[in-house]
Image (cartoon, rainbow, N blue to C red):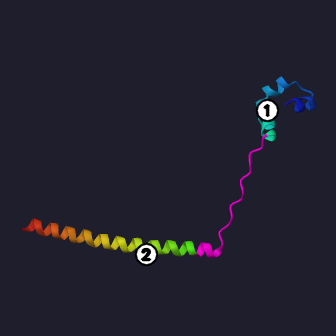
Amino acid sequence: MTTVAEAAGVSRSWLYRQTDLHFEIARHRHPAPTLPRPERASSDSQHQRIENMNDEIRRLNAEIISLRQQLAEHYGHQRADNLT
């Protein structure tokens, strides 16, 4: 702050009271660390992920069909018990 105040010909106390300037000076004094850019997935990797997702969808659809059949059987047995 001292260097900036001297270069600008203003007092340090005035500079500290200017919150927007104070923030900018502090930001330049301690810049935020930069994060590495994420690597892009290769086309082979993307293809494998899509295949894995499709396999999971097929598995879940088969599970849904099985659960629906079980539910229908359960309701069928329940209905038959109520009729007797």
Determine whether, in the image, residue 17 is placed left or right of residue 8: left
- Residue 16 drawn at (x, y percent): 80, 27
What's the residue at 92%, 29% (across, down)?
6
Magenta-drawn stretch contains 61: no
The kind of residue tagged 2 is Arg
- Residue 58 drawn at (x, y percent): 43, 75
Most frequent secondary structure within the magenta stretch: loop
Residue 82 drawn above or below residue 35? below
What's the residue at 77%, 44% (across, down)?
31
| Mark seen at residue 82 | none
- Residue 30 drawn at (x, y percent): 78, 40
- Magenta residues, start to end: 30-47
Q: How many marks?
A: 2
What's the residue at 27%, 73% (across, down)?
69
What's the residue at 49%, 74% (across, down)?
54
The answer to which image quadrant residue 27 occupies is top right
Q: Quick one: label 2 or label 1, which is nearer the N terminus?
A: 1
Location of mark 1 (residue): 22
Determine whether, in the image, residue 77 is placed left or right of residue 25: left
Kind of element beneath mark 2: helix
Which quadrant holds the N terminus?
A: top right
In 3D space, how far apart are the residues under numbered discs 2 and 1 (Cα atoms)?
A: 59 Å
Determine whether, in the image, residue 84 is placed left or right of residue 41: left
The kind of residue tagged 1 is His
Tell me if mark 1 has few (under 14), some (14-19) or many (20+) residues whose alpha carbon lies within 10 angstroms of its own. Answer: some
Location of mark 2 (residue): 58
Tell me if mark 2 has few (under 14), some (14-19) or many (20+) residues whose alpha carbon lies within 10 angstroms of its own. Answer: few
Residue 19 drawn above or below residue 65? above
Magenta-drawn stretch contains 36: yes
Kind of element beneath mark 1: helix
